[in-house]
Image (cartoon, grey):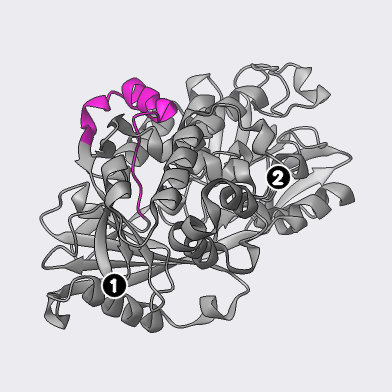
Amino acid sequence: MIRVTAASYWSFEMGQRIAVLGAGPMGLAVAYQLALDGHQPVLFEADDRVGGMTATFDFGGLEIERYYHFHCISDHAFLKILEELGISDKIRWTETKMGYWYQARLQPWGNPFALLKFSGLSFMAKFRYGLHAFLSIKRDDWRPLDRVEASGWIKRWVGSEAWEVLWRRLFDYKFYEYSEGLSAAWIWSRIRRIGRSRYSLFREKLGYLEGGSSTLLNTLKTSIEARGGDIRFKSAIEKVVIREGKVLGVQVSGQLEAFDKVISTIPLPYVPKLMPDLPGDVLAKFKAIKNIAVVCVIAKLKKAVTENFWLNTNDPEMDVPGLVEYTNLRPLGQHVVYVPFYVPGENPLFAEPDEAFLNKVRRYLKKINPSLTDEDFVDIRASRYRYAQPICDPGYLDKLPPVELPVRGLWVADTSYYYPEDRGISESIGFGRQMAKMAAGQDTGSDRK
């Protein structure tokens, strides 16, 4: 599924020294596959730990991810690598619930009965919404939706009533000024992934790893190092050095370190700065890519807010599309809630201090559950990620440069490249392993499109 240029047909000897940029799930998967196939990857990470957006932190004595993650029964690449690493016994599946906060009341959500009972929609609006969701889950071919604009596509199917109640604020409070320029294929993939996490029409099952994402991340790290790979933390690359159409290596701390090849998995907006010697037309494509930032608030509470894992919100006093009550999926002995504020990085909202977001979350959670008091908030933090979500507009894939760039020995990708799928650990692992094989000359492949 990766777009390949003619240069990918030249072959390489085994045991190549390859630089991998970024130690998120995709970068780790690249390095793991390279090491597995007998190469010598050197993984450069600017942070002091592996993981990227899946990295964990110490939340008042609780090791937990900065940003929430969950797994679906359809996450095949993720489940396969767990088995390879000998940690498939660490996955746990939990029946979870969804809810919808609307008209200042908490309503069940996520199955046909909940839709029928939902207060605030006519029967015809419910029927049209349900039909659209059902057909989206059953659909496999995304290509007819690739060049279709998402909000118009949804409105045509569900009607203006269901759009206003169930969809509009989800778009507005994640994409702001970009909400009317998204790909229908990308939105469809999100509907399908959650829909296919069900093991019956009325029951949803999601997964988590014992020990959280660090169980996988640390096992990958150990496996890479055991096979001769090198992982370097606090090692931000200053430049990918290119001469006469070929990669020479990377510049770190002012020094050139030579490599046969370089594979980058860092967010695409960083590419023009690190690779200024790329051809001008390629640089222009990277510079045109837009991303949404996130301020993700994580709260530790003495009591649960609701019984739901996922809660959509439509409330004029809340500027979030929803929240995730993580411990209704993964029990931790405490109650943990994630509240993400997605916003374009150039929007003034992103520049507001952390305390402004923390105060909003305290207020929102107490409104949803009036029994909560200030004393129930054990701890509360905010994490920021500037390039959290690519803005996938119609025809998005064709606007990206090819993974194999027109520079000998250079490959670039991030979560944008498995469009129309949304960001996910499984997708990153599957794509990263495929890219590693291609870059090492073992997979001539076919065009991704």
Q: Earlier in the sequence, mark 2 or mark 1?
A: 1
Which residue is depicted at the point 15% across and 62% down? 304
The image shows residue 194 at horizontal and vertical percentages of 39, 40
Which residue is depicted at the point 54% across and 41% down? 188
Which residue is depicted at the point 48% across and 82% down? 352
Mark 1 crowdedness (10 Å alpha carbons): few <14, some 14-19, many ≥20: some
Residue 299, quarter of picture: bottom left
Q: Is residue 179 visible?
A: yes
Magenta residues?
Answer: 68-93
Q: Nearer the viewer, mark 2 or mark 1?
A: 1
70 part of magenta stretch:
yes
Q: Is residue 265 visible?
A: no
Relative to 172, 298 lies left or right: left
434 part of magenta stretch:
no
Q: Is residue 317 above or below residue 235?
A: below
The image shows residue 314 at horizontal and vertical percentages of 39, 67
| Callout 1 amino acid | Ala
Secondary structure of residue under mark 2: helix
Mark 2 crowdedness (10 Å alpha carbons): few <14, some 14-19, many ≥20: many
Quarter occupied by the N terminus = top right
The residue closer to the viewer here, 245 or 129, is 129
Relative to 362, 335 lies left or right: left
| Residue 396 marker | 2
State yes or no: discs 2 and 1 in contact (Cβ < 8 Å): no
| Callout 2 amino acid | Tyr
Residue 400, quarter of picture: top right
Residue corresponding to mark 1? 104
